[in-house]
Amino acid sequence: MAPSLISETYAKDLSKLPSFSGECYVSHTLHFLLPDDTVILRLTEISYEKADFNHIAVVEEIAFSSPEFIAGYIDELRNDGLKDADVAEKILKLNMMDETATKVIARFAYDHFAFRDRQGQLAQGKQIRGAYVTPEKAGAGLAGQIYRQLTMLHHHLVCDNAQTVYGATLWAVTVRNVAGRVDIYNAAKQEYVEELGDGAIGVNGCIPWDIGKLNPANLRKWQQYPVHPTIQHCYYLVLIISA
């Protein structure tokens, strides 16, 4: 289940709900502000029984009937020293949302994941199984902020077992900057390996990414980072962030 690098053309279709024969329900709804911006997002988590994925998170950018007023009021509340969570709560209480103009900008699919934490205790988290961000929002750090919210919601978040170079860079750089510590975990042995450090390498030298079936000529953004020199598919490694 290691993050093997794959082609940028790879994608999991999250435009449709997963096929399922059981029930589904909204398990969580949360609102949050993007840092250094006046955009408020709504994350709605739908949980499924007997489906392709355990959960789908739909992320929407909320529109307001008077956007200029809302942007100015957000800046005012921040200048008063309010934390972003409190700012978002105050804004929503104004009941000025324009649902007709609110739009979906991202979807994430994830499953249950059991593992042993750094102390060897059994822990539960969620493993990303698919991610989609609309092209106009891609590359702006949005996925990292959503991963941060999912980590706070579920305590532990685990990377997908296949990543594009963009996705790998997200975990190696952005997730470390936004969500904090990233740990390398051996799922085969069910044990913690070491913390991921700078340069996409563990603090003690572990290289958790392999090149998989990707043509070396397509590495592009990953050229500055290493891939495992001998193991082509080290499926037993995953990356975990914890709240």
Image (tube, helix red, strand yellow):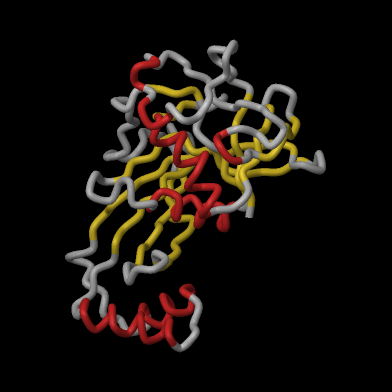
Nearer to the camera, 12 or 45: 12
Nearer to the camera, 114 or 169: 169
Give coordinates of residue 217: x percent, y percent: 35, 17
Query: Which quarter of the picture shows residue 40?
Result: bottom left
Nearer to the camera, 100 or 205: 205
Instruction: Please report the residue visible at 63 percent of the width from the left and 38 percent of the height from the top.
Output: 196
Residue lying furthest front in this view? 224
Instruction: Please report the residue visible at 49 percent of the width from the left and 55 percent of the height from the top.
Output: 27
Nearer to the camera, 174 or 223: 223
Instruction: Please report the residue visible at 57 percent of the width from the left and 44 percent of the height from the top.
Output: 157
Query: Which quarter of the picture shows residue 170?
Result: top left
Seen in the picture, residue 70 relative to 43 is either above or below; the reply is below
Instruction: Please report the residue visible at 21 percent of the width from the left and 76 percent of the height from the top.
Output: 67
Viewport quadrant of the N terminus: top right
Give coordinates of residue 63: x percent, y percent: 24, 69
Give coordinates of residue 98: x percent, y percent: 21, 72
**How many numbered circles does the render carry?**
0
Seen in the picture, residue 240 relative to 42 is either above or below; the reply is above
Residue 174 placement, left or right of 202: left
Give coordinates of residue 145: x percent, y percent: 45, 55
Residue 219 placement, left or right of 2: left
Seen in the picture, residue 40 relative to 74 is either above or below; the reply is above
Viewport quadrant of the C terminus: bottom right
